Image (spheres, rainbow, N blue to C red):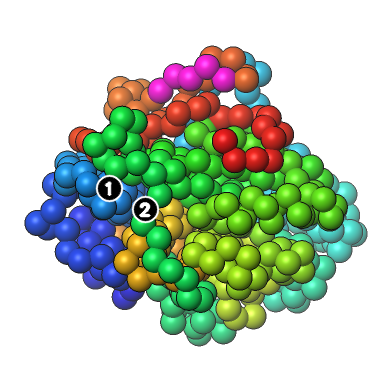
């Protein structure tokens, strides 16, 4: 899609849907987006951007409901609640809740020898590789001294050569002329590409007039993702009734609050794809799946036989979702990255706080929004498969999402962020019984008159379920 020029979130919703082949919604569902930014302390219209994508998702789900024989419905999205969803892990309350802060010093902005800034990201396995390259201890002062002995570009290149995370702070103008920025500017914020031919498939599941029917009931989703965009994509599909099986490797670390935040509505299992038997089990799951969502670097699954085109041969009609940081083509396509690095490279962090003391937007603005965009792509691909047939590839990325958000108008300089208070968010807070005991959390944001989004199961600890469809 062309980046947005309208000032109204409902128009951004219509533009998103139109870019994915959806006709104008004005004479169908009754859509309302209420409230306005700023909510979060940034001039980017983060809450309204998220609200517009959540509204697009609800509309796409309502369309699938109509394809089952249901009627159009009223859709409401609150901007303040949508903004809260960009920090939804912060609303978790459960026994023993804590966020592991190891690697915090290696995940921060540091100033290099040439005066430029670079954002290191030592999360998961990048921490040790970062410290080995810098030849220092895991201490903020030691890291700052080590970074100050490098030029920022040289350090970015060296980190990339090691396969660990880090990115030089750039302005939006610099990103626009960078080869990766140029590559991303040439693709829509949500790509839906045809992988191959396959017969038309009706939306799976019961008709709207059958008991228990929901927009995505009967749609089977394999979720091979972690932190945060990928799991958010599958969580969004689950809230509309999809059967989601979250598949993780037992070799990979996890962050408990993020698992709890993004796993409601899902079952969860382990498969080690380096084991022949487990790879065969995943292939069996793929053959009975409708959607395969993955958030790893393309080569990681392709070398194990799970490239998108291979899955289209394995299961004609499948919808493959690929979610990454920097995009799927261009010189950065194979680099690992996270929310912080998407903000850093695209100019978002620099505009937010300035170059003297740069800082990130205080929310996972690109992570969650990209997850919502991925779910939107899936639902539109399901609709297209029903009318056109085919296997489809949905592609989204954190950096492309950041570029879209940055294309939207800003809030007024004098506007004060509304922030979050207990009363304003209370209507979206839900309680669940979970493996962690009583759990309080932020629930689904969209309100739909006929098919209200909900999760039918609490978040499951990793490896709670067998690797099989229910």
Q: Residue 449, can we see it?
A: yes
Q: Quadrant of residue 466?
A: top right
The residue under label 1 is: 68
> CA separation, marks 2 and 1?
7 Å
What residue lies at 35% left-to-right and 62% top-to-bottom? 386
- Give the position of the C terminus as an image quadrant: top right
x and y, in percent, of residue 435 in the image? 62, 20
Q: Are marks 2 and 1 in contact (CB under 8 Å)?
A: yes
What residue lies at 51% left-to-right and 76% top-to-bottom? 196
x and y, in percent, of residue 122 in the image? 74, 52
Residue 129, which numbered label? none
x and y, in percent, of residue 300 in the image? 74, 64
Residue pushed farthest left? 27
Dot 2, how many residues are within 10 Å of its Cα: few (below 14), some (14-19), or many (20+)? many
Dot 1, how many residues are within 10 Å of its Cα: few (below 14), some (14-19), or many (20+)? many
Question: Over which residues does the magenta segment extend?
Answer: 430-434
Q: Is residue 381 above or below residue 187?
A: above
Residue 203, which numbered label? 2
Q: Residue 261, can we see it?
A: no
Q: Nearer the viewer, residue 201 or 379?
A: 201
Question: In the picture provided, is 207 more to the left or to the right than 327?
Answer: left
Of the residues under marks 2 and 1, which one precedes in the sequence? 1
Q: Nearer the viewer, residue 29 or 167?
A: 29
Q: Is residue 387 above or below residue 75?
A: below
Q: Secondary structure at mark 1?
A: loop
Question: In the picture provided, is 361 more to the left or to the right than 120?
Answer: left
């Amino acid at each position: 899609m062309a980046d947005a020029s309208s000032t109204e979130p409902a128009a951004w919703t219509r533009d998103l849907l139109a870019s994915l082949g959806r006709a104008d919604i004005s004479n169908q569902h009754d859509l309302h987006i209420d409230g306005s930014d700023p909510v979060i302390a940034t001039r980017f219209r983060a809450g309204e951007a998220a609200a517009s994508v959540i509204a697009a998702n609800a509309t796409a789900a309502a369309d699938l409901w109509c394809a089952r024989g249901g009627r159009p419905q009223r859709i409401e999205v609150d901007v303040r609640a949508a903004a809260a969803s960009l920090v939804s892990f912060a609303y978790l309350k459960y026994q023993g809740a804590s966020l592991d802060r190891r690697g915090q010093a290696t995940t921060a902005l540091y100033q290099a020898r040439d005066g430029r800034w670079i954002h290191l990201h030592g999360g998961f396995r990048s921490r040790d590789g970062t410290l080995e390259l810098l030849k220092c201890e895991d201490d903020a002062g030691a890291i700052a001294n080590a970074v100050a002995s490098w030029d920022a570009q040289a350090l970015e290149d060296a980190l990339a050569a090691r396969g660990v995370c880090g990115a030089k702070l750039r302005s939006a103008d610099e990103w626009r002329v960078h080869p990766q920025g140029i590559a991303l500017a040439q693709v829509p914020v949500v790509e839906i590409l045809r992988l191959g031919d396959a017969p038309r498939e009706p939306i799976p599941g019961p008709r709207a007039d059958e008991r228990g029917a929901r927009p995505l009931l009967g749609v089977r989703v394999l979720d091979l993702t972690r932190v945060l965009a990928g799991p958010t994509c599958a969580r969004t599909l689950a809230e509309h009734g999809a059967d989601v099986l979250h598949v993780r490797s037992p070799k990979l670390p996890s962050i408990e609050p993020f698992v709890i935040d993004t796993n409601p509505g899902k079952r969860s299992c382990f498969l080690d794809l380096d084991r022949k038997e487990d790879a065969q089990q995943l292939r069996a799951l793929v053959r009975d799946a409708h959607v395969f969502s993955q958030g790893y670097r393309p080569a990681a699954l392709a070398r194990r036989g799970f490239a998108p085109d291979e899955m289209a041969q394995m299961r004609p009609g499948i919808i493959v979702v690929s979610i990454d940081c920097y995009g799927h083509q261009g010189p950065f396509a194979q680099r690992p990255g996270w929310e912080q690095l998407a903000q850093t490279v695209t100019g978002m962090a620099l505009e937010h706080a300035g170059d003297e003391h740069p800082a990130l937007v205080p929310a996972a603005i690109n992570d969650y929004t990209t997850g919502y965009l991925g779910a939107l792509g899936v639902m539109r691909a399901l609709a297209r498969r029903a009318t056109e047939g085919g296997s489809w590839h949905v592609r989204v990325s954190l950096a492309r999402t950041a570029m879209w958000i940055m294309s939207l108008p800003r809030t007024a300089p004098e506007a004060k962020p509304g922030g979050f208070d207990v009363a304003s968010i209370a209507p979206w807070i839900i309680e669940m019984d979970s493996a962690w005991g009583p759990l309080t959390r932020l629930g689904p944001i969209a309100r739909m008159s006929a098919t209200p989004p909900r999760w039918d199961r609490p978040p499951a600890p990793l490896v709670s379920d067998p690797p099989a469809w229910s």
